[in-house]
Image (spheres, helix red, strand yellow):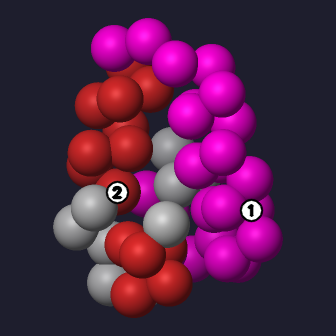
Amino acid sequence: EVILNEKEGIYERYAALFALRNHGGEEAICAIIASLGARSALLRHE
């Protein structure tokens, strides 16, 4: 939820991204893929 919420700060969204990456699994992968549509160029870059 945090990674997709554009009202969250970039630090919180990055923390969510790296937590998902470290956790792994199908749900984490789906959340990361969903975040690729984010407006934040910085987040898409990672």
Horizontally, is 6 left or right of 17 in the view?
left
Q: Amino acid at mark 2?
A: Ser
Callout 2: helix, strand or loop? helix
Give the quarter of the image for residue 41. bottom left
For label 1, count other residues whose C-alpha is less than 10 Å away and answer few (under 14), some (14-19) or many (20+). Answer: few
Helix, strand or loop for the magenta stretch, by majority: helix
Callout 1: helix, strand or loop? helix
Horizontally, is 28 left or right of 38 in the view?
right
Q: Is residue 29 above or below residue 10?
A: above
Give the quarter of the image for residue 35. bottom left
Q: Position of residue 43 (x, y in %)?
A: 48, 73
Residue under numbered circle 1: 12
Residue nearest the observer in this picture, 24 or 38:
24
Q: Is residue 45 above or below residue 40?
A: above
Q: Amino acid at mark 1?
A: Glu
Label 1 near label 2: C-beta < 8 Å? no
Q: Position of residue 30 (x, y in %)?
A: 29, 31
Q: Position of residue 16 (x, y in %)?
A: 65, 47
Q: Is residue 12 above or below residue 26?
A: below
Task: Say whether residue 11 is magenta.
Answer: yes
Q: State which tag comes first along the sequence, 2 or 1.
A: 1
Q: Position of residue 13 (x, y in %)?
A: 63, 62
> Which residue is pictured at 38% across the width and 44% down the height?
32
> Which residue is pictured at 57% across the width and 77% down the height?
7
Q: From this viewpoint, which residue is outermost toward the top?
A: 25
Magenta range: 4-26
For label 2, count other residues whose C-alpha is less than 10 Å away and answer few (under 14), some (14-19) or many (20+). Answer: some
Mark identifier at residue 23: none
Task: Say whether residue 14 is magenta.
Answer: yes
> Which residue is pictured at 67% across the width and 77% down the height?
10
Mark identifier at residue 35: 2
Number of callouts = 2
